[in-house]
Image (cartoon, grey):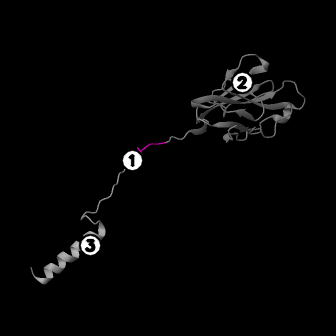
Amino acid sequence: MNKATKGTVAIAAAITLLLGGAGSLAYWQESASVAATSVSTGQLHVTVPTTGSTWTVKKNATATATPIANISTFKMVPGDIVTYTVPFTTTAEGDNLTATGTVAWGAAATLPAGMTSSTSGTYNSVAFAGTTFAVVKQATPVNGQLVFTLTWDFGTTGNTTGMSQTINLAATTVTVQQTPAP
């Protein structure tokens, strides 16, 4: 062998001895994987549909309410009780979800003499008074409704001041909000 080849073999042997002594570089290694997984989130939602609202009138305090076909052409008179019913739904889904609902009722604009307005609501077939209700935790929609009533008493002095007026009901907002879990 020539000197260059002998030198290369000597260097390789020296490196092998330094790295492992026996001529091999060995170590152990192993891997394990965690399977891919997902976590689903819940939801808290309120909807006021664009259809399904109804207007009715009880004439001269009769017990039977009659549907009003077109509120924009209806003309209220003393003795009428006009009711506007608006449906809404909530969806509340989440293992640790607790929530409340609030209603910011829209007030009726200036009312003629002898006319009063009132509001009421139901949620999950239970009447609620005021502005709050407890949201039912359920993945399918839970029904509620908002009811606005205008009552114009017959025979009240000053009813002539209400002729040819427009009564506006201000917008009403239903809000659902998560609350801290107990």
Q: Do the residues labelled 3 and 2 touch (CB within 8 Å)?
A: no
User: Looking at the picture, which amino acid does disc 2 mark?
Assistant: Val
Residue at 42%, 46% (x, y): give it: 34
Say whether disc 3 or disc 1 marks the residue closer to the N-terminus.
Answer: 3
Residue under circle 2? 57
Q: Nearer the viewer, mark 3 or mark 1?
A: 3
Segment colored magenta: 34-38
Q: Which of the two residues, 38 or 146, is positioned nearer the viewer here?
A: 38
Residue 58 lies in what quarter of the image?
top right
Marking on residue 49: none
User: Looking at the picture, which amino acid does disc 3 mark?
Assistant: Ile
Residue at 60%, 38% (x, y): give it: 45
Residue under circle 3? 15
Tell which residue pokes out farthest to the top in this image.
63
Q: Which of the two residues, 109 or 157, is positioned nearer the viewer here?
A: 109
Q: How crowded is mark 3: few (under 14 residues within 10 Å), some or many (20 or more)?
A: few
Marks 1 and 2, Cα distance to the nearest angstrom? Answer: 69 Å
Q: Are marks 3 and 1 in contact (CB under 8 Å)?
A: no
User: Looking at the picture, which amino acid does disc 1 mark?
Assistant: Ser
Q: Position of residue 178 (x, y in %)?
A: 66, 41
Task: Give the tally of numbered discs.
Answer: 3
Residue under circle 1? 33
Q: Which of marks 3 and 2 is in front?
A: 3
Residue 179 lies in what quarter of the image?
top right
SS at circle 2: strand
SS at circle 1: loop
Say whether disc 3 or disc 2 marks the residue closer to the N-terminus.
Answer: 3
Q: Residues within 10 Å of mark 1 (few under 14, many from 20)?
A: few
Q: Position of residue 33 (x, y in %)?
A: 39, 47
SS at circle 3: helix
